[in-house]
């Protein structure tokens, strides 16, 4: 199965800091850099696994942007390839999942994040990067939602999680991940702030007490099903130090591309 790498340079739905729109180009540069290996940990040559790239611009109006993201994911799925997207803020995941649902029906989602992103609206915006999973659940894009690394859930978000039977796990509950709920068509969404800021400082909303890079890689390796698609979001190059977070993002691209191929 071929993998298409997409870049979504969008950060206008970010509530606190811009910068994530700069991420796709930088992560793509890291992937091509001679400084690190093109092979996944399992030995897959990622230059072969990723058969095409889509790094075109997006419209600047939010609604048109979401439409464009859905259309581009739909185009990848329609030719039988799998989309691996680099955000952008986390708002991009809702239009991605809409296109994935149109192809596969509701998918089970592994969501790594410090935040549940289950607000019905945030600062008046129902499509904020704090809301994508609320929108995706109400649009029937998701079967089981398994969230890992959460350390900022408000009562409102806990209530919505309970309503939709969301498995919401803290970073200290790695031994309780319900892998059996991640069978069938599964989609992976990784917000880099799910990792500890020690490993991924380049994010807009750092929350200490998060996952290590190793823990995320181990979690991915234990997934029972090959993912049908994935995204890696919220990398903010303006907050990064020495490209540390870009390197983590590039590693995750390699591992997930190898899993999908
Ligand atoms: Mn987050
Ligand atoms: Mn998020």
Image (cartoon, helix red, strand yellow):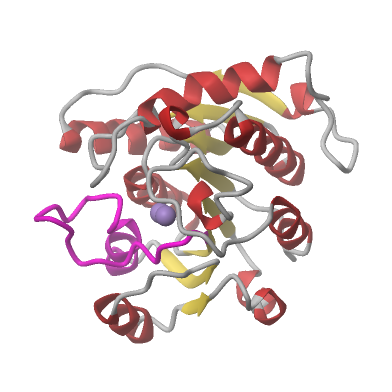
Q: Is residue 156 above or below residue 137?
A: below
Looking at the rendering, in which quadrant would you find the C terminus? Answer: top right
Write down the quadrant of residue 72 in the picture: top left
Residue 54 shows in the view: no
Q: Is residue 1 above or below residue 139?
A: above
* Start-end of magenta stretch: 112-139
Q: Is residue 43 above or below residue 172?
A: above
Residue 17, percent across and down?
28, 38
Residue 4, percent across and down?
59, 29
Ligand 2 picture quarter: bottom left
Q: Would you say 20 lies left or right of 157 here? A: right
Q: Would you say 120 lies left or right of 256 here? A: left
Q: In the displayed image of the protein, which residue is found farthest to the right?
A: 43
Query: Which residue does the image show at 37% across and 86% down from the upper left?
Result: 162
Query: Which residue does the image show at 35% across and 39% down from the upper left?
Result: 70
Residue 109, percent across and down?
52, 63
């Amino acid at each position: 199965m071929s993998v298409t790498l997409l870049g979504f340079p969008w950060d206008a739905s970010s509530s606190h800091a811009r910068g994530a729109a700069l991420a796709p180009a930088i992560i793509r540069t890291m992937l091509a850099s001679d400084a690190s290996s093109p092979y996944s940990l399992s030995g897959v040559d990622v230059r072969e696994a990723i058969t095409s790239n889509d790094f075109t611009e997006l419209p600047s109006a939010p609604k048109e942007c979401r439409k464009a993201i859905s259309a581009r994911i739909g185009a990848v799925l329609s030719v039988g390839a799998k989309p691996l997207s680099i955000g952008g803020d986390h708002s991009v995941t809702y239009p991605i999942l809409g296109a994935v649902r149109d192809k596969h029906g509701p998918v089970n989602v592994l969501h790594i994040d410090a935040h549940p992103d289950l607000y019905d609206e945030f600062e008046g915006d129902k499509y904020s990067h704090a809301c994508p999973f609320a929108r995706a659940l109400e649009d029937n894009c998701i079967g089981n939602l398994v969230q890992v690394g959460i350390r900022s859930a408000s009562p409102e978000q806990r209530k919505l999680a309970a309503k939709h039977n969301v498995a919401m796990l803290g970073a200290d509950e790695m031994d309780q991940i319900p892998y059996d709920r991640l069978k069938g068509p599964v989609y992976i969404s990784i917000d880099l702030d799910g990792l500890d800021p020690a490993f991924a400082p380049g994010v807009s909303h750092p929350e200490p007490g998060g996952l290590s890079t190793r823990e995320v890689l181990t979690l991915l390796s234990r997934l029972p099903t090959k993912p049908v698609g994935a995204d890696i979001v919220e990398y903010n190059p303006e907050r990064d130090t020495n490209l540390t977070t870009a390197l983590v993002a590039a590693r995750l691209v390699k591992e997930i591309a190898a899993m999908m191929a």
